[in-house]
Image: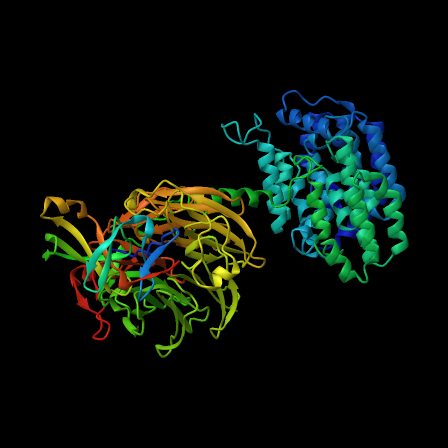
Amino acid sequence: MVSLASQPEPVNSETKAIADARPTRQGPASRLESATEPSQITATSRHSILQTQPPSSLVPSTRPRALVEDSEGDSTPAAPSDSPRAYKRQRIDCQTNPPSGSTVLSAIDRTSCTQNPSTDRMFIPRPDKPSTSSVSIDTISEAGPSSITLDKAPRSNGITTINGFKPNGSSPTSNGISKHSSSVARVSLPGTTLYDDPYVDREEFVRLVIQSLRDVGYNESAATLEAESGYSLEAPEVTEFRQHILNADWANAESLLSHLTAVDEEAIWEAHFLIGRQKYLELLEARKTAAALQVLRNELAPLSTNAEQLHALSSLIMCSDPEDLRRRASWDGASGTSRQTLLSEMQHFIPSTTMIPSRRLAALLTQSRYYQREHCLYHNAPMNAASFSLFSDHHCDREDFPCVTTTVLDVHTDEVWNVAWSHDGLRLASASKDKTAIIWRIGPDAEPSSRECVVEFTLREHPFPVGALAWSLDDSILATSADQLILLWDTKTGKCMQTLDSHSETVSALVWLPDGSGFMSASLDRKIFSWDMAGKLRDDWSGVPIRVTDMAVTPDMTRLVTVGMDYIAIPPTMADASRGVSREPTPPPPTSNGNDAAVVGSRPSENRMIVYDLKSKAIELSLPTDGELTSVKITEDSQFALINHAPDEVHLWDLNEGRLARKFTGQHQGHHVIRSCFGGIDGNFVVSGSEDRNVYVWHRDTGVLLEILPGHGVGSVNSVAWNPRNERMFASCSDDFTIRIWEPLPQYAAGGLLSSGNVGRNGKGKGKVRS
Amino acid sequence: MGMKYRRYLAGERIYGCSKCKTHLATIHSMVSRAFNGQHGRAYLFDGVVNVVEGDPNDRQMTTGNHTVRDIYCVKCATILGWKYDRAYEASQKYKEGKYILERNLLVDVQ
């Protein structure tokens, strides 16, 4: 810093110029001095010298003093015993440097001298190099870090570049740093921890802070902190190494590598291989095939133990153009992020104390955020700075959870069996035993008492009770099922456009495909059909081994999850399937279902979940279950399936692992079709109907039962549906002929709402608002 | 009552509703073919599925007085026969809890 301070350059001077200029004047000389007069100035005297140093002191007079600190290590290899930090550094250095560190380092000096005369600036930190290697020093010297910082200043710009910041912007502050930090005294603190607790190491913490400051461009503050704390972000060779990688200076990167790693030889080979691979790919990308071949033969081949890997690399020579190369190598090119990726791969070989992983503090804060989110049972807020302050633990109030009925839709004349929201969240379809489906308009008004809530269409032409409901992606078509029939309704006119009668038994599930190409239907007739938008049969999955009771497609279109009953091991033949009723190939097992013991010939229903690969129709998973399965829903990330399992359980299946991840218990389910769903931000809640009139809500990640919501009348709550556009609203439907809309307690006019009692919302809709 | 899917039977011979083919009983649960109903021959079964039972009422039959309930197909609501709640004659007690399906209203749905 001292030398920089002496630079008369204006603020705008280019950093590299500074860096390059310095060594020529002082670099070599200082090294000499440090070698020859290592112990002339004692450690105690150094403080005062530095403190009294005027910022503008001349180079010749200041430089030797700064150098003395660097040389201290040479003279006193053992760190002062009262400095806890020295112990730490000692440990690290032992890890990171081979015993014969000094000789190796001199080799480095040579390489940097001879091969990179243009990077003379690397010399500046050199004086402390020997000290690093000799265990005790480098940055131990109390003022050392600041001088290192100084020297490093231009390169630390390189660091910020990595993190996406423009390097140029920080050069002016380099001067500032030098001036400022030169006047900052190191603060000596007892102990090695940040506070009293033994878990946070002060050096680690300070280095994280320095890294964060650098990342956002507070370079002066970072330098000050380095000076004051005596800790530097990282050893200069780490900075150099990073720079070499990012600049594709492979030779220098590799020569530094062995000093940075603490792993055994074999692992270093692996690191060399990765660097060589990058080099090879970049040469290929630049169409320097001959040079690439050289690398492949002379560098990669001796390092690789994996012939297949080598073969794959060599085959890339055949790539027709760089684009082809990048695609086949799954590599984004020299101008992409591949060098940064290589750097983060290098992290496996370099101890994190030597090279701190990038944006480490942010990573820790993210972990903290996830931890708090996981422990927030009523979590229903988006993950942003507003809901996650660093100053307080995140917490969502129960009051914000939709646990109050704000609207009761009371128009159906029989049990309501199913509900489904349109994708825009403004309409709700309900399916009833009264042989109608109703499309309700639920207005966008946030205030329930003034919200429009009316029957838009009553879909009457169902010859049977209505079971399944599904909105097309653009909400223009509503598909409903009435026993074996599928009806398609125009949701703008409320007219039935088409009736599909290909199924021979009850259609239990209708699902629009996430790619908008059409929809699928599943039935108790052991068939799954795929239909196009116009209602034309596209595909016929005959031979499904279960009578499907529900089905869902993962949002990523990879899987079809079905649940059902009456599993038969050998699927019916095509001929059987085409006759509509499949033949049972095996005689019924002797035991009989407790429930229908009297019915001879009725066998225990073999319930099963079957997961298909959607494209190939191959069965990925086929699992028998104890009880009847009545509902399937899938998480947004396509990983989990939520399945109602009688008696009295809801299961969460991990589709990737093929295992049961969690059970939700408490609700009642015997012999009826009860459905559940995910809800809230990130699907944090699991909600289910129940045969005891209540709605049950659990915290998805812990399985904790959060709410048992009363309100519905006698009978079962058959289905629930969370509003896809409003994470604070869901609907439930019941045998009591009604649908309830659940929301948080209205914050305004709550009293008025409570007293409003049964109020006809609209002459047509007869929607009623209660509280 | 709640939503419920119809039950499906398995076996060599399944009797279904002649109108809508809903599964009703298997030959394994048949107790007797020697019954008569309103439409001719009728069968007595141990158990049937997918039927709705009507209200009980007393009926004088050739074998004496019985308390019976009409049974309807759960899907198409056709009256298919009846269920014996109670037989007044001691010799007819074996019918209690059993079901009559009229042959002419049945169809094989194998």
Residue at image point 26% right, 69% down: A450
Colouring mode (rainbow / by chain / secondary structure / one colour): rainbow
Q: Position of residue B16 (x, y in %)?
A: 32, 60
On screen, A219 above or below A417?
A: above
On screen, A412 above or below A153?
A: below
**Residue at the front extreme, as displayed:** B34
Q: Nearer the viewer, residue A641 or A7?
A: A641
Q: Position of residue A211 (x, y in %)?
A: 62, 43
Q: Nearer the viewer, residue A81 or A313?
A: A313
Residue at image point 18% right, 45% down: B94
Q: Does residue A446 appear anywhere in the picture?
A: no
Q: Does residue A653 appear anywhere in the picture?
A: yes
Which image quarter is the C terminus of chain B in?
Answer: bottom left
Q: Position of residue A394 (x, y in %)?
A: 41, 46
- In this rendering, the count of numbered labels is 0
Q: Position of residue A405 (x, y in %)?
A: 25, 58
Tell me where residue A351 sits by quadrant.
top right
Tell me where residue B1 sits by quadrant.
bottom left
In the image: residue A508, left or right of residue A190: left
Residue at image point 38% right, 41% down: A590
Q: Nearer the viewer, residue A492 or A72?
A: A492
Q: Nearer the viewer, residue A401 or A88?
A: A401
On screen, A42 above or below A477?
A: above
